[in-house]
Amino acid sequence: MQAKQVTASAEAPVSEACLRNQQPIADMLERELPPHSVVLEIGSGTGQHAAFISRRLPGIKWQPSELADRIAGINAWRERAQNSNFLPPLVLDVAQDLWPVKQVDAVFSANVVHFIGWPKVRAMMAGIGRVLKHTGLAFFYGPFNYGGQFTSDGNRLLDQWLRERDPDSGIKDFEQIVLAARKEKLRLLKDIAMPANNRLLVLQKYV
Ligand SMILES: C[S@@+](CC[C@H](N)C(=O)[O-])C[C@H]1O[C@@H](n2cnc3c(N)ncnc32)[C@H](O)[C@@H]1O
């Protein structure tokens, strides 16, 4: 249930969840992303999504970012991938005021919203509002609740595990995410069903 993470080598960490979800995520991004987009990924984790998606969509530029302690793993995947559109990872904590990027065409974040608490989610929305260009797209992949209800037993157990680890974290209500995004001038375009009771929310920046 909880995304298991094993280490394939000292340098390149492997998330089994990424191995399962990278193909369906890439399929959707290929459909939704304008060609030649510069995409900021927030909370890149192992770096597997960056490696897989940058190979699958060679026309885009993929800018991974993470907390400082995860950068070495992403660099290991970058070295292994050898994709010129897989940019060097940036250190980015969503709570920081100044983000190390200027304007991007799109933002992608997988499984971060449920991993952090509301103050950081709001900071992330505000940061996205600052760096996303007008009409740019923001993608949030992961589990969400609807009408305050879990959408599966697996998601309920994941939420329990998250809160035991960090009481501020947990699966967020879709409706509250949409409201928090709107405060930063991001409006919901699509809510796409993904495998294993996950969703891909697609939002667009407006002025
Ligand atoms: C469940 S993992 C998801 C990783 C990856 N996106 C994936 O789907 O496999 C959540 C990630 O959020 C990152 N994270 C936690 N707090 C963060 C913060 N304040 N700013 C940026 N990233 C953060 C963690 O380091 C972790 O890699």
Image (spheres, rainbow, N blue to C red):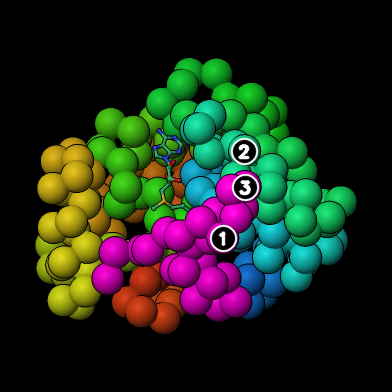
Question: In the rendering, which numbered label is found on residue 11?
Answer: 3
- 76 and 31: which is toward the camera: 76
The correct choice, above or below, for 10 with respect to 173 in the image is: above
SS at mark 2 in the image: helix
The answer as to whether callout 2 falls within 8 Å of ligand 1 is no
Q: Give the residue at x 55% y 78%.
A: 24
User: Over which residues does the magenta segment extend?
Assistant: 1-24
Q: Residue furthest front?
A: 10
Residue beneath disc 1: 8
Can residue 182 be seen here? The reply is no
SS at mark 3 in the image: loop
Does the magenta run of residues contain 49?
no
Does the magenta run of residues contain 3?
yes
Q: Position of residue 163 (x, y in %)?
A: 15, 48
Q: CA distance from mark 3 to mark 2?
A: 7 Å
Q: In the rendered structure, which amino acid carries the disc numbered 2?
A: Ala
- In terms of sequence position, does the residue under pointer 3 or pointer 2 come before the other? 3
Residue beneath disc 2: 72
Q: In the rendered structure, which amino acid carries the disc numbered 3?
A: Glu
